[in-house]
Image: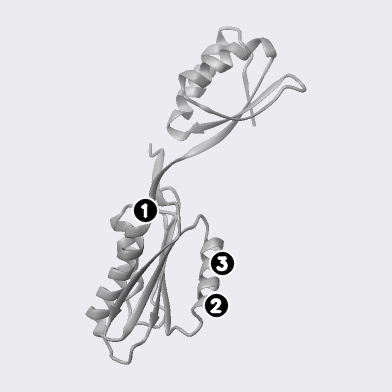
Amino acid sequence: MQDSFLTISNSTEGLYKEKGSKFIAIAHPVTSVEAVKEKLEALRKEYYDARHHCYAYILGYEGAETRANDDGEPNHSAGDPILGQIKSKNLTNTLVVVVRYFGGTKLGVSGLINAYKTAAFEALEEADIVKREITESVILRFPYDEMNEVMKLVKDLELKIKGQDYDTGCVMTLEVIVSKMAIMHEKLTLLNDLGHNIKISE
């Protein structure tokens, strides 16, 4: 089971110039289509006088959602080369927008492909690539005298404690890496079979 993915942690820029045309690439970390739309809108306002705002993004832990947009450039000459650069670094939750200022000389499809690819490459080369773990939140409820067993479970599985509440019994919110979910359930089942009282709250 996949329990981590690569993404970028910061926004970066790249620049490529060819025959008077200027290609400004902006790479940005995103986690939803809404975030993509917001960033695109902001960039269209910032670079309102540019001829094209071409982009590509990959979203989701497994990179399930992808989109490439040529924004008026010849088919597959802009969005796909940008997308290819994101894929080449195995990134997800990443948006790259390349803004083009036309310089008066047509570059041809192969020239455009190279320009968009190179601009996207330059932006991603500047980015900090980070590994993010895929986790789920689990809430445990237990009497106070089970605290030692729970803390032993947390230590053995290297779980992160996100929150604790001891007002009415003990409630602990844990962050569990997805690949450890099954073993955590097994350990809890075993403990409860032995007479312990540690429940997962739905």
Q: Is residue 110 left or right of residue 47?
A: left
Disc 2 designates what residue? 45
Whether 198 is drawn above or below 8: the answer is above
Residue 175, above or below 15:
above
Residue 91: assigned label: 1
Residue found at the far right of this picture: 168
State the image coordinates of residue 97 (x, y, percent, origin top left). Answer: 42, 69
Q: Given this view, does label 2 or label 1 mark the residue nearer the observer?
A: 2
Q: Which residue appears at 22% of the width and 79% of the height?
A: 110
Q: Which residue is under mark 3?
A: 38
Q: Which of the pair 68/99 is nearer the observer?
A: 99
Q: Amino acid at mark 1?
A: Leu
Residue 29: horizontal and vertical position, in percent? 46, 57
- Mark 1 to mark 3 CA distance (whole Å): 20 Å
For the C terminus, the quadrant is: top right
User: In the displayed structure, would residue 66 be above or below residue 113?
Assistant: above
Image quadrant where residue 173 sits: top right
* Residue 100 position in % (x across, y down): 38, 80
